[in-house]
Image (spheres, helix red, strand yellow):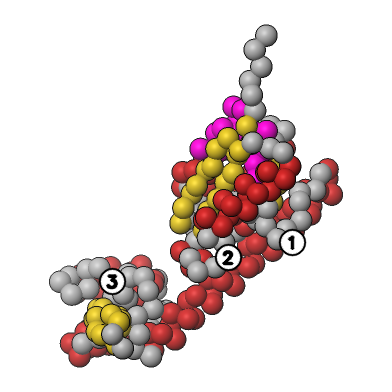
Amino acid sequence: MCHRMKKTVIYVRRSLNEIKQKTSIPYQISSCREYAEKQGWIVHEVFNEGEKSARSSELEERKELWRLMKEIKTGFIERIIVFKRDRISRRADQYMEFVELLRTHNVSMYFAGDNEPQMFDGIIGDFVELLFGDISEHEGNNITQRLIQSRIAKVRGGEWGGGRPPKFYHIEEFEKDGKQEKRLMLSEENKEQIKKVYEFVRDEDFKTIREANTALKKRYATHFKDVKLLGFIPNEIH
């Protein structure tokens, strides 16, 4: 009788805002391989997600995680090593969905990160894992808020905060101390365009933001066809 050899695999991921942090992809892989070596396990495959948010993306949108989940269902995987729980997800519901999949198919998950407690078993274990999932989600929300505030502070100081420029702004490159820098710029003409959007919403009587958006595009089809008021109006930069 032929027995299928079950695999030990590694899953790694990082967010865009973690590039300079300890959670870099090479560091995660190195830590997970070192953990496997100490346990006497052979690593058969590394599922490398690369740069992908575990907060804003759905499980199926992460190709490597989705592939890993399909592999788990086949019964070929015995154990998974990740750096920390938040590599799987920063949303408690997603994390517990993944844990339930592991439980169903008798797959173990281990953590190579410093001070990251290993998984707990049984009913109490599920409760503890849910708590860890909630903590990861809370940390993810805090990181996002800090990133947003940091970008706003940079933009108000005339610097480029990263990402796509807000509507009507543009990026200008310049040299500073021998290095190429970027800053966010706004022309006088575009200042007037932003002012016009706010005045339009203020002066008319709209019941919903969707109604206002439709009316704006109907009146100013050329200038404001790409404006989405739901994100434009509360934007602190505008």
Identify which residue is drawn at 46% across, 47% down.
61
Kind of element beneath mark 1: loop
Q: Are marks 2 and 3 in contact (CB under 8 Å)?
A: no
Up-down: is 110 above or below 25? above
Camera-near label (2 vs 3) is 2
Front residue of 218 and 61: 61
Amino acid bearing label 2: Lys
Q: Is residue 13 visible?
A: yes
- The residue carrying mark 1 is 115
Residue 147, horizontal then vertical, whole percent: 50, 75
Residue 227: numbered disc: 3
Give the class, few, some or many, for how many residues have Cα within 10 Å of label 3's Cα (few <14, many ≥20).
some
Residue 213 sits above or below residue 126 on the image: below
> Disc 3 and disc 1: Cα gap in Å?
46 Å
Give how far across and how far down residue 132 sits, in percent: 72, 58
List the residue tagged with mark 2. Answer: 22
Q: Residues within 10 Å of mark 2 (few under 14, many from 20)?
A: few
Type of the residue with mark 1: Asn
Picture residue at 83% right of the left edge, 43% below the top: 122
115 left or right, relative to 186:
right
Q: CA distance from mark 2 to mark 1?
A: 14 Å
Return the x and y of residue 220 as percentages of the image width and height. 18, 75
Res 170 quadrant in image = bottom left
